[in-house]
Structures are given as structure tokens and as C-alpha cells.
Image (tube, rainbow, N blue to C red):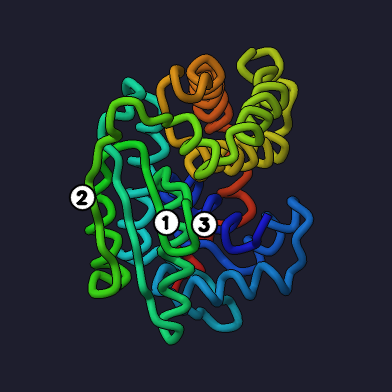
Amino acid sequence: MRSQDLTITILGSSMRRASGRVWSGGMVELIGEFGLSAEAVRAALSRLVTRGLLRRHRSGRLVNYALTPKAHQLLAEGDRRIFSFGRREARADAWTLLWHAIPEDRKEGRLRLTSSLRFLGFGTLQDATWIAASDREVEVRELLDQLDLRAYVSIFLARMVRGSEPEQLAIRAWDLEGLSAHYDDFLHTFSPFTKAAERRKLSDRDAFVTRTLLMHAFRRFMLGDPELPDSVAPLHHRRAEAIKVFDSVYEGLAEAADRHFEEIALVRSADWA
């Protein structure tokens, strides 16, 4: 797991619920529970400050962080994608095609566009040609405006002509075999915690770690599942079961996970500058 991605997962799932600031030492301790070094965590926090997602505050020797309005917007957009994933009928009657010619001096923007497109369910046909099995025009336009890349990108809405083979297109654009294996791993790992008796066996620390890993693993489905109908990619049953497990475990562990987060990472009001 990349330290920056893991930090965003924790800030999104825990910090907003706590409505407070986090201090750097607490975040180092929390993310260290996932095997990442203090240097990696501090570097991730600094990068998030540079990206305008965190605001740094000082109170004496204490360094703490608060989410910016930009971060709240980004996390809200992520929530809409995560909590709507797989909850509508899978269809492939409208396809979104995207082609870009982003210059080399906008490399960082290109990288952010690539990761965001994957999160929206796009797969890649060629290096600069992306496809989604749904109408994503609105989301893509908003994304391009945020990244200031609209001048370099063309968007097409298309339908597949009768007699075409969407299965071959899907196999080329998405790793459906790997996706199926990821669903199996996810269900094997997290299904036991749908039972209240199993959740009660976890300490607050273990509940926090499990809930964070659950969200991190579930977000991967957005990066690889185009939500195609079973006639193209027979994944509906696994997808539906994964969503059911996610909903149950994410809420079931929330109280204990929040206690651990607040105990370790939150800055108390007396320490605020």
C-alpha cells in the first residue's frame, strides 16, 4: 500500500467522522500499524499539504493537520463513487471514450487523470485511449476542469453496433480474471466479520486496522470493475456479495475503530493554536 493512498483512506473514513485535527505523531503511530515507516508517513502528509488537501498548523512543537475544503470535496466525490458502486443495474448500452494528448510538462496532471479515470471505472485500450461501460461525461468534465486539462482531451459517447463482441473489448481493457480473484480474496478475508460475535473479539486497534483494510480493498473494485452485465462479464453475484459484506463490516466496526483513531490521532482542543 502506498503511504499517501493509505493516509487518504484513513482521513476519509475516520477523520471526517471525528471532526477534528490530527497530529503528526498520532498519524505516524496509526499508519505504522500497517508496516509503514515514520519517514514515509511524514512524506505523505507533506505531499498532501502540497496538493492542497491538508492545512498544517503549529502549536509550539506540536504539528497538526486539518482537512481543506478541497479535501472535503475530493472525499465527498469518492464517497459518491464508493457508496453507489454496484447498486444500479449493470448495462453496456452507452460507452464513454476518452482520448488525450497531454504534453510532457503536464506529467503530474496526466498521472492524476489516469488514477481518477480508473476510479471511475475506465479501462485502457491504448496508452492515451480510455473506455468506460457507461455514460461518464459529467464526471469526466468535472475531473478535467479540476485538473485544468480540458484543452488536451476529447470525449466521445458511443454505442456498440449489433454483432460486435463486447467480451473481447472487456478482456482487453480490464483484467477480469484478476478482478474475479480479488473478489474471492475480499470475501474470504472479510466475510467472517459480518458476524457480531467475530467483531466483538477484536480490540479497538484491530477493529481500526480491519476497517481501514476493508475500505482500501473495496476501493480497488472501483479501479478494476467496469460493472458490465453478466452477459459480458459474469461478476454480478460476487460484486453483490462483496457490497453486502462491505456495508455490514464497515458500519459494524465503526464505533470501535473511531475510538482507536480518536485516542491516538486527534489533537485535543486545549492543544489547538
**Is 175 situated left or right of 1 in this image?**
left
Whether 264 is drawn above or below 199: the answer is below
Q: Position of residue 102 (x, y in %)?
A: 38, 75
Residue ID for mark 1: 116
- Location of residue 41 (image quadrant): bottom right
Q: CA distance from mark 2 to mark 3?
A: 24 Å
Circle 2 is placed at which residue position?
138
Q: Are marks 2 and 3 in contact (CB under 8 Å)?
A: no
Q: Residues within 10 Å of mark 3 (few under 14, many from 20)?
A: some
Residue 92 shows in this picture: yes
Q: Residue at x 24, y 58 (%)?
A: 142
Q: CA distance from mark 1 to mark 2?
A: 14 Å
Quadrant showing the C terminus: bottom left
2 or 3: mark nearer the eye:
2
N-terminal of the two: label 2 or label 3?
Answer: 3
The residue located at (58%, 63%) in the rendering is 4
Q: Earlier in the sequence, mark 1 or mark 2?
A: 1
Amino acid under disc 2: Val
Count the numbered circles shown: 3
Counting residues from the start of the chain, the first of labels 3 and 1 encountered is 3
Q: Which residue is mark 3?
A: 8
